[in-house]
Amino acid sequence: MDGSLKTRIMYAGNLSFAQLNEYLEFLLETELLKKNRIDNKNVYRTTQKGKMFLHNYYEIMELLRNEKEEENSILLQSARFNHNRLSYRSRRKV
């Protein structure tokens, strides 16, 4: 079956039934998901709009991760510089 049932989404997302219904309602209203009736069961599928949203989301997260890594690298370099400077000063006082 292509798509997922409510219970699968609920367990995969570690959601309560109330949370699941709230999120599904939002995702259906914004057309990020669509609901199809197959064999008397509601099956939820990601729409093309939903796939584009996920693609853009992952791209943004990658950009932020790279920016954060650069920021952490600069902070680490600064901390090393300050540590070395303090170590040098304390050795000179002896």
Image (tube, rainbow, N blue to C red):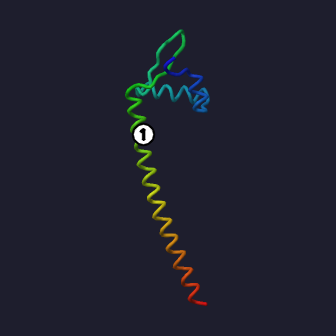
Q: Secondary structure at mark 1?
A: helix
Q: Is residue 14 left or right of residue 79?
A: right
Which residue is at 59% across, 27% downward?
10
Q: Is residue 85 above or below residue 62?
A: below
The residue carrying mark 1 is: 57
Which residue is at 53% across, 28% downward?
22
Q: Nearer the viewer, residue 41 or 85?
A: 85
Q: Nearer the viewer, residue 11 or 79?
A: 79
Query: Quadrant location of residue 13?
Result: top right
Q: Amino acid at mark 1?
A: Tyr
Q: Quadrant of the C terminus?
A: bottom right
Residue 39, position in %: x, y? 53, 9
Which residue is at 53% across, 77% downward?
84
Q: Is residue 57 left or right of residue 18?
A: left
Residue 24, position in %: x, y? 50, 26
Which residue is at 43% across, 52% downward?
66
Residue 93, position in %: x, y? 58, 90
Mark count:
1
The residue at the far top in this view is 39
The residue at the far bottom in this view is 94
Residue 43, position in %: x, y? 51, 18
Decide: few, some or many residues near mark 1? Use Cα within 10 Å; few <14, some 14-19, many ≥20.
few
